């Protein structure tokens, strides 16, 4: 009865993307089990192999989960928000295991745990207090903005942490503050724009310099609004993209530690991303959304790179790697063919152009009308 309702590709891809929960819910459990087995040996050399797990990458992924949980909570998607919360908790268990063996300092672990714990509680409170005027109109918009600010400010710091640990031990720490500087600069610009409205009698006088201030302030306000919307839309996805990139770079830098990595967890990442591409890929090919698909394709590419590292280290057979790549190529082709039936005007070239520059060619847009 249920499958009779799946009469179109749009309904099918929505069903397939819902199945990704089956991959993402138990995502970190195999890695937790592998870490526990390594720690139980008590062998310092074996425990040292856990350095292949990127601290900054996991932190970025958890912050991305928190941002996405906040968005889903605002949409009243309780189970979607719960999936993100489970992702945060299971990833936190992995980091706690690293903290136990002193691979994470306490000054970093405890504030991060506090932030994530408070963030999850506040996100869940929306389901119970969201209808109250004070919560809906005052607290919640500010809380969403604070989370976006945290994502923008912390992402450069996490990137610098990863570079410091993986490639560049002498890298200074000041580049990690770039996000904070940009954020403060934007806030200062917005404050300056507001001042032009706070003293209108002064700025509305017929004076060339004063009229110029008003003109520039209006332009700056519009530019900041567009920039903020674009950056806010990409923040969670950039955090997720950095998560997979950090794991891939650690695999390149520490090939001798790859035995500590769970193949099952990486396989679940691939399965979940492919199921997500059923929907995000359709939206991309249709020229409707590229952010979701771009981050999913990036994560999938990084996971293939991780499996290539495992192949090079002799932890994965050539046949297994070939079957993995063949299955990915086959499924991506299946998505394109099915989407092409629903959107005949789409093409591979137009899809690539939209993915790279964010614009659908005019002739395709006219045909889709």
Image (cartoon, rainbow, N blue to C red):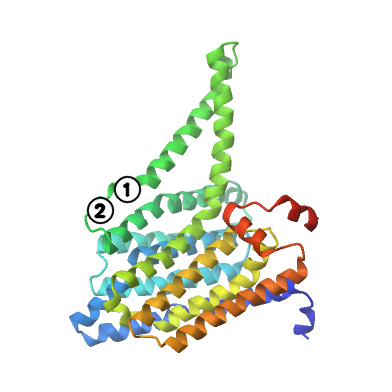
Residue 28 visible in the current orientation:
yes
Judged from this view, the residue extending furthest toward the left is 44
229 or 132, nearer to the observer: 229
Query: Which residue is at a point 25% across and 70% down the rendered structure image?
Result: 103
Judge whether 147 appears above or below 209 on screen.
below
Query: Which residue is at a point 72% across and 63% down the rendered structure image?
Result: 346
Query: Which residue is at a point 75% across and 84% down the rendered structure image?
Result: 3
The reply to whether the C-beta atoms of the residues labelled 2 and 1 are less than 8 Å apart is: yes
Residue 199 visible in the current orientation:
no
Q: Quadrant of the N terminus?
A: bottom right
Q: To which residue does mark 1 refer? A: 175
359 or 17, nearer to the observer: 359
SS state under label 2: loop
Query: Which residue is at a point 56% across and 67% down the rendered structure image?
Result: 81
Q: In this view, does 139 lie to the left or right of 314?
A: right
Counting the numbered discs, the total is: 2
Q: Quadrant of the C terminus?
A: bottom right
The x, y position of residue 312, in whole percent, is: 35, 80
Q: Is residue 224 left or right of residue 29?
A: right
Check residue 368 in the rendering and tell me which mark sits there, or answer none: none
Judged from this view, the residue extending furthest toward the top is 206
Separation of marks 2 and 1 at Cα, in angstroms: 9 Å
Q: To which residue does mark 2 refer? A: 171
The x, y position of residue 318, in whole percent, is: 43, 86
């Amino acid at each position: 009865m249920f499958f009779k309702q799946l009469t179109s590709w749009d309904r099918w891809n929505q069903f397939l993307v819902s199945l990704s929960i089956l991959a993402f819910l138990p995502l970190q459990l195999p890695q937790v089990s592998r870490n526990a087995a390594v720690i139980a040996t008590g062998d310092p050399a074996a425990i040292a192999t856990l350095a292949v797990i990127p601290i900054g990458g996991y932190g970025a992924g958890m912050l991305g989960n928190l941002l996405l949980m906040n968005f889903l909570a605002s949409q009243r998607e309780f189970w979607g928000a719960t999936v993100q919360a489970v992702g945060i908790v299971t990833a936190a268990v992995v980091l706690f295991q690293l903290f136990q063996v002193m691979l994470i300092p306490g000054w970093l672990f405890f504030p991060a745990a506090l932030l994530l714990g408070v963030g999850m509680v506040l996100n869940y409170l929306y389901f119970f207090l969201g209808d109250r005027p004070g919560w809906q109109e005052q607290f919640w918009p500010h809380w969403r903005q604070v989370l976006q600010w945290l994502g923008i400010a912390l992402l450069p710091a996490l990137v610098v942490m990863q570079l410091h640990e993986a490639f560049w031990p002498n890298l200074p720490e000041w580049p990690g503050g770039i996000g904070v500087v940009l954020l403060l600069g934007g806030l200062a610009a917005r404050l300056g724009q507001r001042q032009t409205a706070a003293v209108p009698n002064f700025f509305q006088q017929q004076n060339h310099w004063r009229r110029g201030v008003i003109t520039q302030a209006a332009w700056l306000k519009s530019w900041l609004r567009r920039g903020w919307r674009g950056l806010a839309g990409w923040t969670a996805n950039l955090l997720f993209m950095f998560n997979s990139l950090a794991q891939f770079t650690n695999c390149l830098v520490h090939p001798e530690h790859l035995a500590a990595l769970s193949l099952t967890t990486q396989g679940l990442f691939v399965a979940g991303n492919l199921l997500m591409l059923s929907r995000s890929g359709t939206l991309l090919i249709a020229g409707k959304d590229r952010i979701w698909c771009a981050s999913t394709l990036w994560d999938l590419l990084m996971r293939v790179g991780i499996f290539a590292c495992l192949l090079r280290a002799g932890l994965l057979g050539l046949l297994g790697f070939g079957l993995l790549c063949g299955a990915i190529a086959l499924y991506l082709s299946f998505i394109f063919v099915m989407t092409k039936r629903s959107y005949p005007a789409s093409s591979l070239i137009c899809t690539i152009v939209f993915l790279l520059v964010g614009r659908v060619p005019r002739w395709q847009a006219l045909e889709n009308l």
